[in-house]
Image (cartoon, helix red, strand yellow):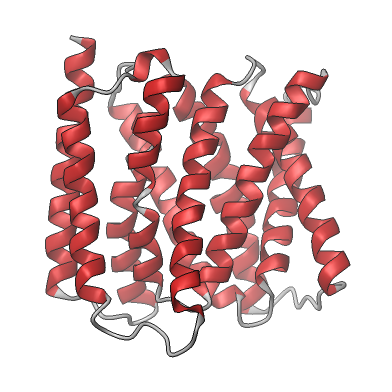
Amino acid sequence: MKNSSLTNWFYLSLLVVFWGSTFALTKYALVDFSPLWIVALRLSIGFIIIYSILKLRGESLPTGLINWAWLALVGLTAFFPFFLICWGTQYLDTNISGILFGIGPLFTVLAAHFLVPEEKLNRLKFFGVIVGFFGLYILLFEKTSIPLISNDFKMLSQIAILLAAIGYSIQNIAVNVMPNITLMQKTSGSFLFASSFALITALLFEGPPIIGIFETSFISVLLMGIFSTAMASMVMFNLTKIAGPTFVSLTHYILPVYVVVLGGLLLKEDIRLYQVLGMFVILAGIVLTRMGSKRQTS
């Protein structure tokens, strides 16, 4: 795996804050917007910001069928996880959504083993992933003894969050192996495809939304578009390039900790002892995974 540094960890921390805040912001946005329109608006806002930066840098959108085939894949792995998180968050506490999202590294490490030459799996790295997964199991096992919601969407909403985590993992791999175009071209091209797809889909199925620009719901969507979408994608694409997809996948371990704390502070969700225990186990998994990666490079 590529060498990491304090800079990489700083970028990773930003990514955790940007992505982790999505769960709480989505709760506020759902008051006035459907999941589909939340996704369409945040992707459109993200694209406007990223495309503006692209033009200020004197760059243009990429050309070539192969490039756009890859950008379409990356764009879809932005749209579908965004939508699944929004839809699932309607029926789950944000802390449970964040915990479920932590399943991503297991898929990323296994897929990177076959697709990314520098990301081969070793015993210590795999053991670290298993330990981190066990930390998630502690949280989920205890939480399932308490009714999450009282309708038939309980299981589907949890599956939706798990699929979103896998979608982000696919995106990490795709960004690493796609043709070598610039970071801004990758970001703006994929978001052009994703935002266009989202807007057309939302208009066809739901019609135009009613937007109050001073409402908390729209401000929440605006913050998601700026930070959780535009800024997060640029950080993620750059970090994937310099540190590798397995390093980026560590966000799935740290993110549940951040989301649980944020949910407790902003939404007054309960923080229980088993959640704290699970977090410590997750952090132990991070340490083991990093030790395995460092052993590969030594």
Instruction: Tell me which residue sits at (70%, 31%) in the image.
Output: 71
Count of numbered tags? 0
Viewer can see residue 298: yes
Q: Position of residue 278 (x, y in %)?
A: 17, 60
Q: Which is nearer the eye, 117 or 226?
A: 117
Q: Which is nearer the eye, 250 or 238?
A: 250
Instruction: Tell me which residue sits at (22%, 32%) in the image.
Output: 126
Instruction: Tell me which residue sits at (41%, 44%) in the image.
Output: 14
- Residue 87 lies in what quarter of the image? bottom right
Does 277 sit left or right of 154 as displayed? left
- Residue 220 lies in what quarter of the image? bottom right
Viewer can see residue 291: no
Above or below, comparing residue 258 to residue 131 in the picture: below
Q: Where is residue 37 in the image (x, y as percent from the top left)?
A: 73, 67
Above or below, comparing residue 222 to residue 148 in the picture: above
- Quadrant (top left/top right/bottom left/bottom right) for the C terminus: top left
Does 212 sit left or right of 80 as displayed? right
Q: Where is residue 59 in the image (x, y as percent from the top left)?
A: 77, 21
Q: Where is residue 160 in the image (x, y as percent from the top left)?
A: 51, 62
Q: Which is nearer the eye, 285 or 10?
A: 285
Does 269 sit left or right of 24 as displayed? left
Q: Which residue lies furthest to the bottom in this view?
A: 150
Above or below, comparing residue 254 to residue 158 in the picture: above
Instruction: Tell me which residue sits at (47%, 61%) in the image.
Output: 161
- Quadrant (top left/top right/bottom left/bottom right) for the N terminus: top left
Above or below, comparing residue 34 to residue 103 in the picture: below
